[in-house]
Amino acid sequence: MTMRIKQLASIVLVMGLMLMVACKGKPKDADIQAAVTSSLTAIPGVTADVKDGAVTLSGQVASEADKTAAEAAAKASKDVKSVTNNITVAAPVAATPQVAITADDALKTGVAAVVKDFPGITADVKDGIISIKGESTAAKWKTLKMALDALKPKRVDASGLKVK
Amino acid sequence: MALQEKYKELIDAAQSSGTTNLQVNEQDGVLHIDGEAPTGAVKDQLWDIYGKIDPNFLTGDVVMNINVATAVAGAKLEVITDSTNLNIRKGPGTDQPIVGKAAKGETVSLISKQSDQWWLIRTDAGEEGYAYAQYLQPVE
C-alpha cells in the first residue's frame, strides 16, 4: 500500500516537473498577443488572437496594402509561429461625384445667349462663376436664374443685381 | 451640410415628388441640385420652394438644374418667353440666322435635343429649327 502511494507520488512529481519544464520553454500567448498588438498600432481596426503561438488576425481595414502590412507586422513579432490573415478589406466608398462645372468658354457662350434677352442686365463669367449686374423684375430674374443654373456654373453671383 | 439643412424642404420636396436622378452636392459653398422632374409643374413647385427659402435667389448658394422628364421627342412644348417671340434658328447658337418665330403661349413639337440648351422644334406652321430650351416647357 505504502509502495503504491510512493509510486503514485513520484509519478505525480515527475509529471509536475515535466509540465513546469514545458511551460518555462514556451512563450506565453498573452505576451505574444501584446507584442503583436503593439506592432499593429499603425493599422487600426485589426485584432490579433493567439493560440499556441499561432496568430489569427481579424478585423477590417481600408486597403489591401494595410492587410498585407498587418500580416507582415504580425509575422515580425517575437515568438510568432504562424499567421492566419482573416482581415477583410472594406469595399471602397463610392467617391462623391464631383459636380461638373461648365468651362468658361462654353459658359460664356451660353450666358451670352441667355442674357441678350434681358435688357438692363449684364453678366460676366470668370472661373465658372456668373456675376450678374443690373436691374430686373423678380419674375424676369427668376426666368434668367433658371436659364443660368441650367448652364451648370459653379455659382451665380447676383450681389450686383437689384430686384425691383 | 449646413446648406443641406437650409434647403432641407427643397431637397425633401424633390425626393417626395418623384424627381429622378436626383443629385445634391455641396461644392465650394454652393449646393448643386440636379435632377429630372416628372412634370413641369413639379419643376415649378421646386423653384417656388427655392424662392421661398432664398427670396429672389440672391444668396447665390444654390445652383439648381431641374429638367422635365416629359420633354422627349414628339412632345408638345409651350413657348414660355416673358413677352417676346421665341426665335427659331437654323442652327444651335445665337449666331445662327433666324428662320422663324414662335409666339408666347404657342405650342410647338420637340423633334430632338441637340444639347441641354438647344432643341430642334417644329411649329404648327411647319417651321423647323433650333430654339433655346429654357423657353420651352412640356405641355401636360
Image (spheres, helix red, strand yellow):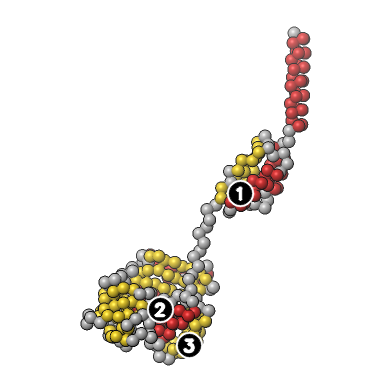
Structural distance between the alpha carbons of marks 3 and 1: 57 Å
The residue tagged 2 is A146
Please tell me in which quadrant of the rendered image residue A2 appears: top right
The relative height of residue B27 versus residue B88 in the rendered view (above or below) is above
- The reply to whether callout 3 and callout 2 are in contact (CB within 8 Å) is no
Q: Left or right of A120: which side holds A24? A: right
Q: Where is residue B103 in the image (x, y as percent from the top left)?
A: 27, 85
Q: Residue A149 carries which label?
A: none
Q: Nearer the viewer, residue B9 or A32?
A: A32
Residue for point 49% across, 85% down: A124
Of badges 1 and 2, the one in the foreground is: 1
Report which residue position mark 3 lands on: A133
Q: In this view, does A149 lie to the left or right of A89?
A: left
Say which chain tag 2 marks: A
Q: Residues within 10 Å of mark 1 (few under 14, many from 20)?
A: many
Label 3 – label 2 distance at C-alpha: 16 Å
Considering the numbered disc 2 on the image, is that residue within a helix, a strand or a loop? helix
**Does the CB distance between marks 3 and 1 fall below 8 Å?**
no
How far apart marks 1 and 2 lie (CA) works out to 50 Å
Per the image, the residue denoted by label 1 is A67
- Mark 3 lies on a secondary structure that is strand
